[in-house]
Amino acid sequence: AQSVAQPEDQVNVAEGNPLTVKCTYSVSGNPYLFWYVQYPNRGLQFLLKYITGDNLVKGSYGFEAEFNKSQTSFHLKKPSALVSDSALYFCAVSHYILTGGGNKLTFGTGTQLKVEL
Amino acid sequence: NAGVTQTPKFQVLKTGQSMTLQCAQDMNHNSMYWYRQDPGMGLRLIYYSASEGTTDKGEVPNGYNVSRLNKREFSLRLESAAPSQTSVYFCASSDQAGNSGANVLTFGAGSRLTVL
């Protein structure tokens, strides 16, 4: 069965510093990996995804993620954090539904990012 | 463009009561999903509908039923609510274009349910 792990419940970063939110995955076959962000009292918003190709994926709001097949990791990064980046971040792996289409996502437990002045 | 709309946003139930969470999307997406979010557990899939006319169980289907009313609407019903079903519920939808394993899910704002 596929799964993702987010080892850190919370990450604290000073504004202007680089940030990393960690994610490791376990899948059979080639992975489709996603990052979503959730602001307080809101639904999840898509940030970026890895399908194939370049290991460095660029997404919304200046975020990027590095896919590492040998370490089975897909860490989320940003060169310079903003206070407004404070939110709950979820890593997810996709499971392709063979009959009829659709895309089931398995989510990690989430990492709370806190960016302080 | 409304995207995915869920109603109600908040609901308090007593144990044993029933209720239906409504979800509608206006993006002409084929697939729809219901997730629940609990602290420390991330999001877990309850049921999904890969296309109109089909529904399937997800990871945590017990105590729930769903109806794909048409292409736009996908409802989640709790027949006899239990305190363990206190959670935040999210509806999502996705297109079915090309390799569906890479399709992005669009989420609603959530429905917060408390069962006393």
Image: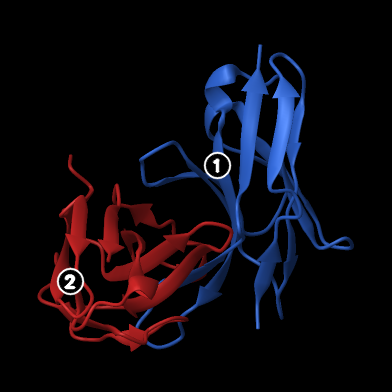
Chain colours: A blue, B red
Amino acid on which disc 2 is placed: Ser
Residue at mark 2: chain: B
Where in the figure is residue B42, as x and y percent of width and height? Answer: 54, 60
Residue B73 placement: quadrant: bottom left
Q: Amino acid at mark 1?
A: Leu
Total numbered labels: 2
Residue under the image location 72 percent in, 30 percent down: A12
Q: Position of residue A40 (x, y in %)?
A: 42, 36
For the C terminus of chain B, give its image quadrant.
bottom left
Residue B109 higher or lower than B91, as above or below: above
Q: Tag on residue A73?
A: none
Question: Residue A94, percent across and down?
Answer: 55, 68
Camera-side residue of B80 and A56: B80
Position of residue B8 in the picture relative to residue B35 (left or right): left
Q: Foreground residue, B5 or A9?
A: A9
Choose between B88 and A101: the one closer to the eye: B88
The answer to which quarter of the image holds residue B79 is bottom left
Q: Is residue B43 left or right of residue B4?
A: right
The residue wearing badge 2 is B75
One can see residue B95 in this view: yes
Residue under the image location 37 percent in, 84 percent down? B61
Q: Chain of mark 1?
A: A
Res. A88 mark: 1
For residue B30, above or below residue B88: below
Q: Secondary structure at mark 1?
A: strand
**Displayed quadrant of residue B95:** bottom left
Q: Crowding at label 2, few (<14), some or many (≥20) Cα neighbours within 10 Å?
A: many
Task: Inspect this view and state whether residue B99 appears.
Answer: no
How far is the residue under mark 1 from the one under mark 2?
Answer: 26 Å
Count residues near mark 1 (Cα–Cα under 10 Å), then give few for <14, some for 14-19, many for 20+. Answer: some
SS assignment at label 2: strand
Cβ atoms under marks 1 and 2 closer than 8 Å: no
